[in-house]
Image (cartoon, helix red, strand yellow):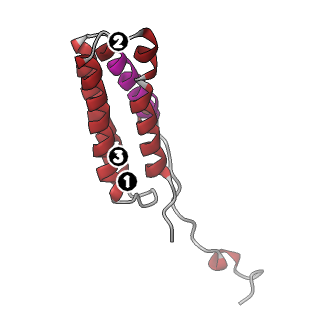
Amino acid sequence: MTEAEHPEQLRLPQSPKRTLSAFDWVMLLGIPVVAYFGVAGAAVGNTAGLVLTGFAALAMVAFRALRVGRRNEPHIAPWTHWLSIGVAVASFVTAWNAFRAAPLDTGIVFTLPLVPVALFFALVIAVFRRPRP
């Protein structure tokens, strides 16, 4: 059999591709924003900041959980489950410590919330990376 006779039979199947729906984009953009404003609110002594950070922490774990159940996407490493929980706990602990030390200086209020945002983007990179063969 030559390739010219039956080209469709000689092609190798492609691996599944990652797809991002509108819901995924809302989570990718919304979780860091809610986490940032939650920690910033907690840093000035606002209890609503803790509530916002709690919602962001739940969304961080849900982000990873909702990506795992998709059959049309590549495999996600099992260790990212514990990473998502760790990122959520670290985000809330950051907000709690900022709340206890409130009111903080203006520079700290605007830079401390970058910690949960950076941790979430590290989680996104870990979830979206290609697994090794």
115 versus 61 height, above or below: above
- The residue segment tinted magenta is 25-40
Residue 56 coordinates in the image, percent (x, y):
31, 29
Q: Which mark is residue 47?
A: none
Tell me the number on the disc at residue 104.
Answer: 2
The answer for how far apart the CA atoms under marks 3 and 1 are is 11 Å
Mark 1 is on which residue type?
A: Arg
Pointer 1 residue: 70
Q: Residue at x 32, y 45 (%)?
A: 84
- Element marked by disc 3: helix
Check disc 2 and report its element: helix, strand or loop.
Answer: loop
Question: Residue at the location (41% across, 38% down)?
Answer: 119
Q: Are marks 3 and 1 in contact (CB under 8 Å)?
A: no
Mark 2 or 3: in front is 2
Q: Secondary structure at mark 1?
A: loop
Q: Is residue 75 above or below residue 43?
A: below
Residue 120 position within the rendered picture, expressed as x and y whole percent measured from the top left: 41, 37
Vertical comparison of 120 with 46: above or below: below
Q: Which mark is residue 64?
A: 3
133 part of magenta stretch: no
Q: Which numbered disc, 1 or 2, marks the residue that appears first in the sequence?
A: 1
Amino acid type for the residue under numbered disc 2? Leu
Report if residue 36 lies within the magenta region. Answer: yes
Which numbered disc, 2 or 3, marks the residue that appears first in the sequence? 3
| Neighbourhood count class around disc 2 (C-alpha, 10 Å): few under 14, some 14–19, many 20 upward | some
